[in-house]
Image (cartoon, grey):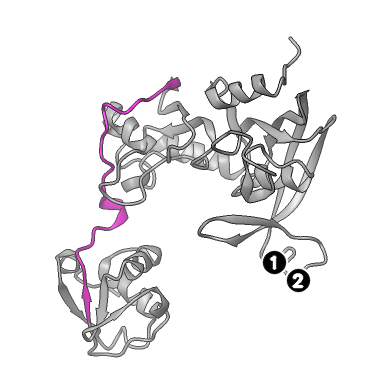
Amino acid sequence: MERDVVAAKQPGHTLTVDAREAGLRLDQVLALLLGASRAEARRVLARGGVSVDGRAVGLTDKGHAVSAGQRLAVEAFTPAAEQRPVPEPDAPLAIVAEGPGWLAVDKPAGTAVHPLAEGETGSLLGAVCARRPAIVGVGEGGLRSGVVHRLDVDTSGVLLFATDEDRWHQLRTAFRRHRVEKGYRALVHGRLEGEGDLVLHLAVARHRPARVRVVGEGHPDFGRRTRRTRLSWKALCHGADVTLVEVAPRTGFLHQIRVSLAHLGHPLVGDLAYGAPGTDGVGRHLLHAARIRHADVRASAPDAPDLAAALERFHCEESP
């Protein structure tokens, strides 16, 4: 099913549903008319940018079946692949390693990996594309240009970008097949001894704000709406009722390390979402991506300043 989507990108343009589209869901028809993904169409609905026959509609109307002849008024729209991150040459950027087609940076805690909306500033990608303009359009393109993987906003440490298309595909495949070696450092509550492997089934319990839960074997959702995850952990040193833990995730899942350590009874210092008893004077969960390795990619980042300060304050000193 083809449509002229150019006009849909103009402010206040009205589109008419034809017989071929009658009976389809509103978000599906919007995606067709806008030349966009259904997720993008839903974001337009969520912003209140659509009306049907003069009536404003929202995200709750996404499943409404449209009828032939209905008129859809759509706000100005730019598909995600055509959007461009704002270059920020004055934004700080710590490049820790670089090679053919890839770039590794030390992400500060509190900085988003990429913008979520056109014109948004303050992301790591804005700083990267100002120094490496060729990254724009690589991979998913748009506001995710060159992004190979992600870290939570409040997680610090090593993050990879691909600066050419071939390397992006190689690295994405490696992440998908769990062939990338990642090492994290986490400061947790309590005294955690020894080392071990942990296999859990996790599920997203809420999207905004994101929250993940552990699903037990007897639960109806087990194995159906869950992801099997695995990580290895090792206690490195102990301080005043805290433990510095080295974590090596073997799979990748939203909040996996945070949820897994909380499941062991040792939530991250500062992680109120997963059971930390208090902030302990820190402004975020103390999780740091210390290293990443795959093929010729080798990169590491020293402890973030707030993690280093917390280790000193809690008298958690590693053996030389």
**Circle 2 sits in a helix, a strand or a loop, which is it?**
loop
Q: Quadrant of the C terminus?
A: top right
1 vs 2, front mark: 2
Please tell me in which quadrant of the rendered image residue 48 appears. bottom left
From where the camera sits, is residue 294 visible? Answer: no
From where the camera sits, is residue 76 visible? Answer: yes
Crowd rating for badge 1 (residues with CA inside 10 Å; few <14, some 14–19, many 20+): few
**Circle 1 sits in a helix, a strand or a loop, which is it?**
loop
Instruction: Using residue 155 as the reference point, say whether residue 193 is left or right of it.
Output: right
Chief secondary structure of the magenta span? loop
Residue type (three-letter) at the residue carrying disc 1: Arg
Q: Nearer the viewer, residue 228 or 117?
A: 117
Dot 2 corresponds to which residue? 220
Confirm whether the magenta stretch covers residue 77.
yes
Instruction: Using residue 315 as the reference point, say whether residue 24 is left or right of it.
Output: left
Q: Nearer the viewer, residue 237 or 72?
A: 237
Residue 242, percent across and down?
74, 30
Residue 191, percent across and down?
81, 32
Residue type (three-letter) at the residue carrying disc 2: Pro
Report the residue that reaches farthest toward the right: 194
Using the image, determine if residue 44 lies above or below residue 158.
below
Crowd rating for badge 2 (residues with CA inside 10 Å; few <14, some 14–19, many 20+): few
Q: In which quarter of the image is the N terminus?
A: bottom left
Using the image, determine if residue 91 lies above or below residue 173.
above
Please tell me in which quadrant of the rendered image residue 103 appears. top left
Stretch of the chain drawn in magenta: 72-96
Confirm whether the magenta stretch covers residue 277.
no
Dot 1 corresponds to which residue? 224
Q: Nearer the viewer, residue 206 or 231?
A: 206
Residue 254, percent across and down?
59, 49
Circles 1 and 2 in contact, beta carbons < 8 Å:
yes
